[in-house]
């Protein structure tokens, strides 16, 4: 959804993760795994990273194919989280470690 500020996006994405209202965009060839989709991190773990994000960890750009849709990128503590929200409150999310870092252990 276009026109949302960082605080609105943060609130919406945390709600979507808590309610299981997230999906993963189908991509043909990507070099790095979406760690959430692969089950290497959980939605609550991703939510913890997002809760630590502030405005300086966020950037927003227009979607490269869908006019009026904003893509939000959160970069914090070695995590790279890319997402966009659709009208029904569902998010499409991709979660990666920066520079190929492995995911942290769940212990």
Image (cartoon, rainbow, N blue to C red):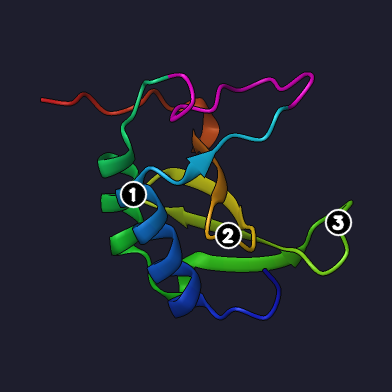
Mark 3 or mark 1, earlier in chain: 1
Mark 1 or mark 2, earlier in chain: 1
- Please identify the quadrant where the C terminus is shown: top left
Q: Secondary structure at mark 3?
A: loop
Q: Is residue 90 left or right of residue 62?
A: left
Name the residue at the left extreme: 107
Name the residue at the front extreme: 88
Q: Residue beneath label 2, please?
A: 88
Residue at 36% x, 21% y is: 40
Q: Nearer the viewer, residue 79 or 28?
A: 28
Mark 3 or 1, closer to the camera: 1
CA–CA distance between discs 1 and 2?
13 Å
Residue 104: % across, % down:
27, 28
What predominant SS class does the magenta segment belong to?
Answer: loop
Q: Is residue 69 left or right of residue 101?
A: right
Q: Nearer the viewer, residue 63 or 20?
A: 20
CA–CA distance between discs 3 and 1?
25 Å
The crowd level at tag 3 (other Cα within 10 Å; few <14, some 14-19, many 20+) is few
Q: Is residue 3 left or right of residue 99?
A: right
Which of the 4 image quadrants contains residue 20?
Answer: top left
Q: Secondary structure at mark 1?
A: helix
Please determine whether, in this image, residue 83 is positioned above or below residue 24.
Answer: below
Q: Nearer the viewer, residue 70 or 100?
A: 70
Residue 76: % across, % down:
41, 54
Q: Residue beneath label 3, please?
A: 66
Taking the magenta stretch, the answer to whether it contains residue 28 is yes
């Amino acid at each position: 959804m276009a026109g949302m500020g960082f605080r609105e996006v943060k609130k919406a994405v945390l709600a979507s993760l808590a309610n299981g209202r997230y999906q993963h965009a189908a991509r043909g060839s990507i070099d790095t795994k979406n760690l959430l989709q692969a089950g290497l991190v959980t939605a609550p773990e991703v939510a913890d990273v997002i809760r630590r994000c502030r405005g300086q960890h966020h950037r927003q750009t227009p979607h490269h194919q869908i006019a009026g849709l904003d893509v939000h990128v959160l970069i914090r503590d070695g995590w790279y989280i890319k997402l966009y929200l659709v009208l029904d409150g569902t998010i499409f999310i991709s979660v990666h470690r920066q520079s190929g870092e492995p995911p942290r252990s769940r212990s």
